[in-house]
């Protein structure tokens, strides 16, 4: 499934800056959800479950899972691009750096109201994070590459394949003890509108190139 979106204005350096900034914002969004203790996205439920049953930290588990999915998608015929590799490596690395900050780790001990604010802010940040990352036009992330190659090989609709993959990750994560809750449901309902709205804002901003390009509709990691 493809949809028009705006590419970030400028040359290679500007696009690389957009890619890195988008991935950092995405990592920050994940950390805010993590510290809210109200539920994570399906893949992060899995990452947290793996971290609880291995020597890996949450950030390192994110990198390990991202690289494993990249290799699986590549083996199935989905060649990785710069954005694919950067997504697999940098999001988890940024998560590791952010969660090592004492003030960030203390957020999870706050009362419910501030933690709800963390949840809302985290989901909202996914929008601009995805717009900057995809706007850099360096290719889909590992999970999105797997989705696309899975749809091509099975002949199923992209939405069906994506839902199946994410549901499998979620179930595995819950079994491993990852945090499933209202935040997980809120993510499922709100992340799409957040990303769509951010694409629209980017297209109307001075940061956008004049002509929109076609690219896979992807959501973050």
Image: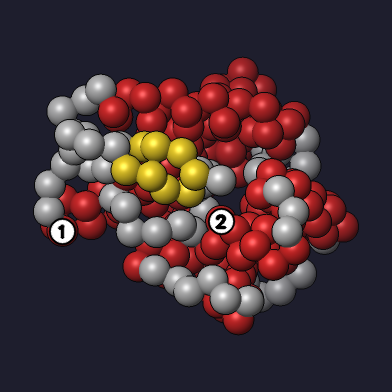
Query: Dot 2: what SS?
Result: helix
Q: Earlier in the sequence, mark 2 or mark 1?
A: 1
Determine which quarter of the picture holds residue 191: top right
**Image height of 155 relative to 136, above or below:** below
**Residue 38 in the image: above or below residue 96:** above
Residue lying farthest to the top in this orientation: 113
Mark 1 secondary-structure assignment: helix
Residue ID for mark 1:
12
Q: Which residue is mark 2?
A: 144
Q: Residue at the bottom extreme? A: 75
Q: Which mark is residue 131?
A: none
Residue at 15%, 58% (x, y): give it. Answer: 12
Q: Is residue 194 visible?
A: yes
Q: Residue at x 44, y 23 (%)?
A: 197
Q: Is residue 210 left or right of residue 157?
A: left
Contact (CB < 8 A) between labels 2 and 1? Answer: no
Give the camera-side residue of 48 and 209. Answer: 209
For the residue pair 63 and 137, the one nearer the viewer reads as 137
Q: Position of residue 34 (x, y in %)?
A: 60, 43
Q: Residue at x 32, y 52 (%)?
A: 137
Image location (x, y in percent) of residue 82:
35, 67
Q: How many marks?
A: 2
Q: Residue furthest front?
A: 155
Residue 94 figure quarter: bottom left
Residue 176, position as x, y percentages in the image: 82, 60
In the visual, does 96 lie left or right of 17? right
């Amino acid at each position: 499934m493809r949809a028009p979106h705006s590419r970030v204005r400028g040359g290679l350096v500007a696009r690389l800056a957009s890619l890195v900034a988008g991935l950092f914002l995405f990592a920050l969004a994940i950390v805010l959800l993590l510290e809210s203790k109200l539920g994570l996205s399906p893949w992060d439920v899995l990452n947290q479950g793996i971290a609880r049953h291995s020597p890996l930290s949450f950030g390192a588990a994110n990198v390990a899972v991202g690289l494993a999915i990249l290799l699986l998608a590549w083996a199935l015929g989905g060649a990785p691009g710069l954005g694919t590799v950067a997504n697999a490596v940098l999001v988890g690395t940024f998560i590791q750096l952010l969660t090592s900050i004492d003030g960030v780790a203390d957020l999870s001990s706050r009362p419910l109201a501030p933690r709800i604010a963390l949840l809302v802010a985290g989901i909202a940040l996914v929008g601009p994070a995805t717009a900057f990352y995809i706007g850099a036009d360096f290719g889909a992330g590992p999970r999105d590459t797997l989705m696309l190659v899975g749809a091509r090989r099975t002949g199923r609709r992209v939405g069906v394949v994506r839902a199946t993959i994410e549901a499998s990750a979620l179930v595995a994560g819950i079994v491993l003890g990852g945090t499933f809750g209202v935040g997980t449901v809120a993510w499922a309902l709100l992340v799409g509108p957040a990303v769509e709205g951010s694409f629209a804002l980017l297209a109307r901003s001075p940061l956008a190139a004049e002509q929109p390009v076609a690219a896979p509709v992807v959501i973050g990691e």
